[in-house]
Amino acid sequence: MAITTYLNLIGGQSLPAKSGKAFQDINPADHSDIVGEFPSSGPEDVDLAVAAAKKAFATWRLVPAPKRAEILYHAGQLLRERKEQFAQDMTREMGKVLAETRGDVQEAIDEAFYVAGEGRRLFGKTTPSELQNKFAMSVRMPLGVVGLITPWNFPMAIPSWKLFPALVAGNTCVIKPATDTPLSVYNLVNTLNDAGVPPGVLNIVCGGGGSVGNALVEHKDVRAISFTGSSEIGSHVAQRAAATFKPVSLEMGGKNAQIVLDDANLDLALDGALWGAFGTTGQRCTATSRLLLQKGIAKEFIARLVERVKALKIGNGLDESVQVGPQVNASQIETSTNYVEIARGEGAKLECGGHGLTDGAYANGTFFAPTVFSGVMPTMRIAREEVFGPVLAILEFDTFEEGIEIANSIDYGLSSALYTKDLNRAFAAIRDLEAGITYINAPTIGAEVHLPFGGVKHTGNGHREGSEALDFFTTWKAVYVDYSDKLQRAQIDNAE
C-alpha cells in the first residue's frame, strides 16, 4: 500500500521541508501500519510560515469578530460530520481506543461551538474619566502571530483549545504538532480552512522540538507561545521565550491524586480510579497516578481494584471491545519500565502488571500491562514523579488532614479528586487541595471546555485554557476620547 505524503501548510500552499527530509507516523498498535509521511522541517520553514502568518494578520485582524466566529461555528459543524473518520485516524496514529478518540474529536466540536459564541463577547470595559467631557474605555486587541506547540495525547482537542480562541481574537497561527500525531492536527486545520479561514491565517510546520519548536519560540515576529507538554520542556520554552519578552502559556505535567475516604461509595470510587488511571493508557496530564486510600477501606479496595485491572482488555484501539490501547512509542514503554524498577527498588509492592507486552497480538506494537503498586510511601519517586503511562501508585493514610497533606506534597498541582459523602470535608478539600482542578466524587479526568483548565506549581505558569484562554490571546488597550475641545491634564488638573 502506498504511503500518503503530507507537506507543511504555509500561506495556503503545501510545501515540503527545505531540508527535503521526512518522517513516518506509525500506528503504535501495529507498526506495519504507516499512517503517513510528514516533513521534517527546520528554522527556514518556520521563517516562511511566520512570514505568511504576519502577512495574513494585516487583513484577518480587520474581519469583525462575529464573522470570525461564524467560521469557527461552521468548522464545528464540519467536524461533527467528519467525527468518525477523524477518530479512526487518531486511533491509528495515537493508539487510544475509539471511544476516547471520538471524545477527543467531540471536545474539538464543543470548543468550536463554545468559542464561536465568544465572537460576540470580546467585551472591554467602560469607566468614568476623572475629567469632564472625557470618555474612557478599554478594548481587547489581538496579539499578532502566535506559535502553538501541541502534544500527542490529545492531538485534536488540545490544538482546538489553542487555535479557536486565538483565531476568534484575530490572531494568525503557526502550529507545530507532535511528531507522533501530526495527522489529527492536519485534519483539524484542513477543516478550519474548509470552513472559510483565509490562506495564511493557519500554518502547519512539522518537525522536532529542537528544529521547529525552538525556532518558533525564538522568532522575533512571533508575539506569544502556547505550549502543552512536559514540565522539563516547558521550562526550556519559557527560558528561550524570555529573551524576546514573549508571553508564554504553559500547560505541563501532573501527578494527580484521587483520595478515597472510608465513608465513600466504594463502587463509585473504584470505577473512578480505574478510568482515571488507565483511560488513555495513563497518558494524560490529568491521569490518576496516585490513589490515596484511608486505611479502614484500603485492603478491600486494593483487592477489588487489582481484580478489575487484571481483567482489562488490552489491544488495538480500533477493536471496539478493547479497553486499553498501546503506549504511543517505545520511549514511553522504556519510561514505564524504568519506573517499575525504581518503585521495586524503593520497596513498593507490585500488585499486577509491571512489564511490556510483546507476544502474540502485542508483538508488533508498544503495549504495557496496566500496573498497580501498593505500599507506596510519599517520599518514593513513584509517588512524586510523572510516569505518563498505565502505572498507579497506592498510598494509605489515617486522617482526612493527612490525605490532603500527602496530596499536596509534590511539585505538581493540576487535578485532584475526593470521594466522600461528608459535605464538610468535600468543601474543605476544595479549599485546601493545591490543584487547578478538583473533582468531588468523580475521577481526576473529565475537563469541560467552558471552565478554566490548568494548574499550579510545576504544572503551569498561571494561564488557563478553556474559558479563560482569551485572556492569553488578547492584549488590552486603554482608549481615551476627550470631547472638551481644550487641553486637559489628567491627574494634574484633577488634583484640585
Image (spheres, rainbow, N blue to C red):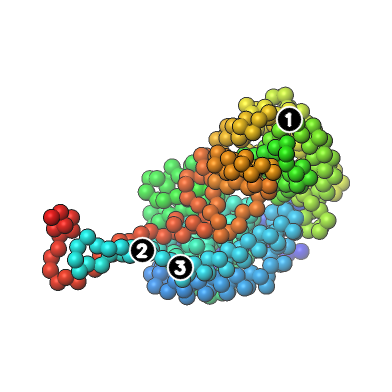
Image mark for residue 125: 2
Horizontal side, residue 133 vs residue 258: left or right: left
Q: Quarter-wise, where is residue 262 in the image? A: top right
Q: Quarter-wise, where is residue 294 in the image? A: top right
- The answer to whether one can see residue 356 in this image is no
- The answer to whether one can see residue 158 in this image is yes
Q: What's the residue at 42%, 47% (across, down)?
A: 241
Reading the chain from its start, which is encountered first: label 2 or label 1? Answer: 2
Mark 3 neighbour density, 10 Å: few (under 14) some (14–19) many (20 or more):
few
Q: What's the residue at 71%, 57% (across, down)?
A: 100
Q: Secondary structure at mark 1?
A: helix
Q: Residue 361's x, y, as percent? A: 85, 49
Q: Residue 425's x, y, as percent? A: 62, 40
Reading the chain from its start, which is encountered first: label 1 or label 3? Answer: 3
Nearer the observer, 407 or 240:
407
- Disc 1 marks a residue whose amino acid type is Lys
Q: CA distance from mark 1 to mark 3?
A: 50 Å
Horizontal side, residue 33 vs residue 19: left or right: right
Nearer the observer, 470 or 406:
406
- Disc 3 marks a residue whose amino acid type is Arg
Q: Is residue 334 above or below residue 447?
A: above
